């Protein structure tokens, strides 16, 4: 059974049958078609995104279902019909967007596709630059969708009525194709009910635009414009690293991490006093102070139009904001201007919520168990081949689009024959971008779902009997001096970690960036002080993404790896190594 709790507006009711419209305390949510005999991946929730009109559940197997908040209380959730596996979903009040493993984005909504607002279309294919169509992240606002490409460029599509796309709304009031907003972007932040957006660049410089009547952007008292049409840089933000920003309609919440403070993760907010957790209007981001947060780090949080819920490292669920439908889970419908702790029913793992996540919808909330979910090496390779800066060979499809790949890996996959790469070039040149992507997925992952006719064209040049993991080992363990390795010296012994696999185990896992320091001799010494047992755990995790079942995890090992947690750049939406161990 899935582990998911629901509270708030139980529309019509569609989420939990035979229950009132207002569910004021968290209760067990169960899918109508849930089957105990289903594969575990079929039942494990990876993400929930919810708005006033719809809610999407994404599962660990890359499939998703959607509930529509319609008048028919007998309706069942519908499967989202996308051929590619899904890695992220976002729901705005007037749009839905889906990001696939392959880096494509399918979206629907009146501001996206006015002629047929209920049909998903590939909006990433509408980006003008064909070399900038691989998407690594998506975010939805109320009536806009934002895309972050693998080249670190941000695009917006949909409504620009408040300047939320960064342009004068009288010049561009709406766009049905993505338009470039800013380059060198590392993260995009918005919210399901918001008309404003934040962009963070690689230098931790923050920019914003959109609706600001309630100072929900937080640029300061001197900014008097109701609508900020041009991306404007912040001159005064809290000290520390910006981990996340989530936006309501009239307020914004920012999560800041500062290693030199205790707790090291704190929340800051700006905007409307009834919603921001401060009980006072604020023109700029101000710390949300409460005894509930003392010596307690923020582990996860979620912001809806008018309420906020927070999970802490000490297993607390905390909330504030509107509660007219019981969406805070307090047992009543009283609004909460400042943070209040919410009583939780017994949860899995002896009430430890380290693997739970919170998702706030328009007027309801979900608390769900999401175990550490990692893509395997096959999926890693698919993503890695999309990273322009790591690729060294180009393939042009029949419609002129460019696909980048690694020559080294192709060489091994194509029977180590240079001529086979030329044959592949010839085949790709006659295929569409969709067919080309299917071919590369076959090359990278041995995916047998490829069209049989298409497979027959490439099977002679692909070493298809060899599993990709074996190929990877051969590549990564090759002693070729031209393949750069990281060398870790521990107790008079050297350990070699191929640089490419560290890249795969880091940048492709948001929130698990493996931080290594390298001197001129290409040696890494960060892990030299770990005990043998801890290093064994670390080494096995690097290559397999899991912890050996037979390893006994002691408190000393947990403490040791937690002390060295600065090896990982943490993110509240993904598990860290400490989460894996407990």
Image (tube, rainbow, N blue to C red):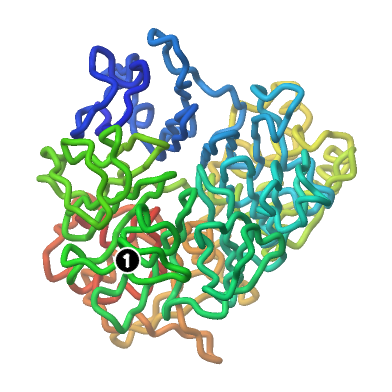
| Residue identifier under label 1 | 538
Is residue 252 shown left or right of residue 396?
A: left
Write the residue at 44% across / 66% down. Answer: 243
- The x and y percentages for residue 153 are 70, 60
Give coordinates of residue 561: x percent, y percent: 25, 71
As drawn, 541 above or below 428: below
Above or below, 530 relative to 384: below
Evaluate whether residue 551 shows in this view: yes
Quarter of the picture holding the C terminus:
bottom left
Residue at 89 percent across and 44 percent down: it is: 400
Per the image, label 1 sits on a secondary structure element best described as: helix
Q: Is residue 421 visible?
A: no
Nearest the camera: 141 or 40? 141
Q: Is residue 20 above or below residue 186?
A: above
Q: Is residue 220 left or right of residue 531?
A: right
Does 508 sit above or below residue 356? Answer: below
Can you give x and y, in whole percent of width and height, for residue 152 in the image? 67, 62
- Residue for point 78% across, 58% down: 393
């Amino acid at each position: 059974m899935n582990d998911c709790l629901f509270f708030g507006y139980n529309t019509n009711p569609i989420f939990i049958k035979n229950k009132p419209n207002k569910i004021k305390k968290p209760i067990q949510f169960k899918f109508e078609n849930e089957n105990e005999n289903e594969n575990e991946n079929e039942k494990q929730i990876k993400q929930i995104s919810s708005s006033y009109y719809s809610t999407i559940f994404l599962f660990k197997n890359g499939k998703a279902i959607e509930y529509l908040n319609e008048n028919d209380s007998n309706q069942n959730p519908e499967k989202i019909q996308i051929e590619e596996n899904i890695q992220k979903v976002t729901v705005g009040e007037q749009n839905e967007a889906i990001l696939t493993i392959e880096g494509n984005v399918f979206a629907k909504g009146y501001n996206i596709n006015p002629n047929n607002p209920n049909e998903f279309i590939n909006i990433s294919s509408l980006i003008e630059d064909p070399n900038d169509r691989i998407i690594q992240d998506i975010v939805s606002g109320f009536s806009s969708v934002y895309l972050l490409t693998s080249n670190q460029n941000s695009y917006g599509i949909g409504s620009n009525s408040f300047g939320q796309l960064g342009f004068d709304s009288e010049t561009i009031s709406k766009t049905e194709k993505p338009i470039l907003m800013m380059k060198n972007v590392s993260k995009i932040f918005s919210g399901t009910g918001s008309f404003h957006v934040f962009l963070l660049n690689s230098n931790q410089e923050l920019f914003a635009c959109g609706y600001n009547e309630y100072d929900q952007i937080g640029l300061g008292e001197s900014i008097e414009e109701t609508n900020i049409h041009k991306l404007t840089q912040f001159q005064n933000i809290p000290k520390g690293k910006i981990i996340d920003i989530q936006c309501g309609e009239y307020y914004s919440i920012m999560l800041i991490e500062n290693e030199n403070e205790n707790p090291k993760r704190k929340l800051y907010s700006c905007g409307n006093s009834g919603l921001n957790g401060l009980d006072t209007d604020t023109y700029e981001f101000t710390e949300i102070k409460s005894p509930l947060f003392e010596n307690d780090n923020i582990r996860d949080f979620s912001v809806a139009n008018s309420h906020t819920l927070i999970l802490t490292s000490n297993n607390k669920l905390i909330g504030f904001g509107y509660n007219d439908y019981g969406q805070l889970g307090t047992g009543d419908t009283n609004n909460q201007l400042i943070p209040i702790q919410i009583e939780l029913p017994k949860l899995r793992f002896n009430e430890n919520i380290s693997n739970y996540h919170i998702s706030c919808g328009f007027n309801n909330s979900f608390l769900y168990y999401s175990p550490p979910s990692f893509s395997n090496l096959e999926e890693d390779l698919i993503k890695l081949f999309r990273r322009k800066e790591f690729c060294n060979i180009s393939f042009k499809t029949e419609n002129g689009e460019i696909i980048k790949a690694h020559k080294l890996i192709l060489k091994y996959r194509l029977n180590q024959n240079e001529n086979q790469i030329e044959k592949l070039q010839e085949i790709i040149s006659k295929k569409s971008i969709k067919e080309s992507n299917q071919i590369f997925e076959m090359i990278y992952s041995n995916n047998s779902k490829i069209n049989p006719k298409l497979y027959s064209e490439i099977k002679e040049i692909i070493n298809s009997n060899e599993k990709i993991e074996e190929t990877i080992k051969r590549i990564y363990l090759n002693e070729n001096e031209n393949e750069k390795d990281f060398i870790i010296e521990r107790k008079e012994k050297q350990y070699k970690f191929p640089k490419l696999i560290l890249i795969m185990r880091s940048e492709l896992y948001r929130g698990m960036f493996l931080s290594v320091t390298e001197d001129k001799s290409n040696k890494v010494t960060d892990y030299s002080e770990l005990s043998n047992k801890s290093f064994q755990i670390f080494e096995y995790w690097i290559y397999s993404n899991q912890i050996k079942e037979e390893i006994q995890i002691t408190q000393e090992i947990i403490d040791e790896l937690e002390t060295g947690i600065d090896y990982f750049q943490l993110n509240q939406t993904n598990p860290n190594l400490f989460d894996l161990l407990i």
